[in-house]
Image (cartoon, rainbow, N blue to C red):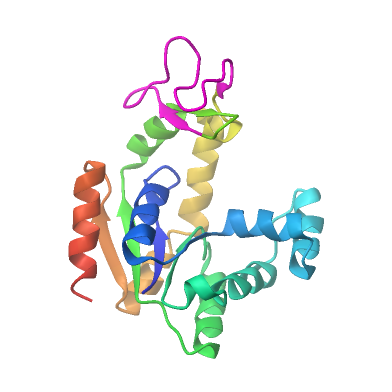
């Protein structure tokens, strides 16, 4: 299966994509991860991407799609993949379709996790992360130890709120999502590939609904 996850930042895409990746034995491909990997390995596309990242600019669509193309040709993706964070725009989606067609592949389904904006704001602004081991906590549902010591790596003073999770930044991220990425729902609905999931349920219930609907494909 070649899958795409859509949804607000904080909607649970990463959690559910990781579960599906393990269940179907296919890689979860995050554009952020492949960008960082290409930059660290100093590949041709990585060097190109770094110029934009260092300047604080968005990496152009053709570079992002080029990195995705390199990644899906690796052996672990031959039976499928899960894209998380790409495409972000209609333009990227069109390029992605063309890329997959070239490799005689196509998107099997697009999973849209539906969560109310206010709930996402609460989730993200309550999120805390260990800067050492990247363990994620939530002040409401999974608070960090009162000692300030991470329960996973036992380091003290490493649990912080990321700048991306501050209220003002979260509002800006959601606004950008509504403008750039939300139109992808209609794009994939017209292709008959959109699967809408109630992302406000428990993690297990979301998981069960995704699994049940994918079985019908």
Q: Quadrant of the C terminus?
A: bottom left
Q: What is the magenta segment's predominant secondary structure? A: loop
Identify which residue is drawn at 60% across, 75% down. Answer: 69
- Residue 178: where, in percent of width, then height? 46, 53
Query: Is residue 123 placed above or below 208 in the rendered structure?
Result: above
Residue 7 visible in rendering = no
Identify which residue is drawn at 38% across, 47% down. Answer: 15
- Residue 212: where, in percent of width, then height? 17, 63
Q: Quadrant of the N terminus?
A: bottom left
Based on the picture, tell me whether residue 155 belongs to the magenta stretch: yes
Identify which residue is drawn at 42% across, 26% down. Answer: 126
The front one of 151 and 192 is: 151
> Over which residues does the magenta segment extend?
135-159
Left or right: where does residue 10 sit relative to residue 65?
left
The front one of 21 and 121 is: 21
Query: Is residue 112 placed above or below 173 in the rendered structure?
Result: below
- Residue 29: where, in percent of width, then height? 51, 61
- Residue 106: where, in percent of width, then height? 42, 82
Give the total of numbered labels.
0
């Amino acid at each position: 299966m070649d899958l795409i996850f859509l949804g607000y930042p904080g909607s649970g895409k990463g959690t559910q994509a990781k579960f599906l990746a393990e269940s179907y034995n296919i890689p979860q491909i995050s554009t952020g991860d492949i960008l960082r990997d290409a930059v660290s390995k100093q590949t041709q596309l990585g060097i190109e991407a770094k110029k934009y990242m260092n300047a604080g600019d968005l990496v152009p669509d053709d570079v992002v799609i080029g990195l995705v193309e390199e990644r899906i040709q690796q052996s672990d993706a031959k039976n499928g993949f899960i894209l998380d964070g790409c495409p972000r725009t209609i333009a990227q989606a069109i390029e992605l379709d063309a890329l997959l067609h070239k490799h005689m592949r196509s998107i099997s389904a697009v999973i849209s996790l539906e969560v109310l904006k206010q709930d996402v704001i609460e989730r993200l602004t309550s999120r805390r992360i260990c800067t050492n081991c990247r363990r994620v906590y939530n002040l409401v549902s999974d608070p960090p130890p009162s000692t300030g010591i991470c329960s996973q790596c036992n380091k003290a003073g490493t649990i912080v709120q990321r700048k991306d999770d501050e209220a003002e930044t979260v509002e800006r991220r959601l606004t950008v999502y509504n403008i750039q990425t939300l139109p992808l729902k209609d794009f994939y609905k017209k292709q008959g590939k959109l699967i809408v999931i109630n992302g406000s349920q428990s993690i297990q219930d979301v998981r069960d609904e995704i699994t049940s609907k994918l079985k019908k494909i």
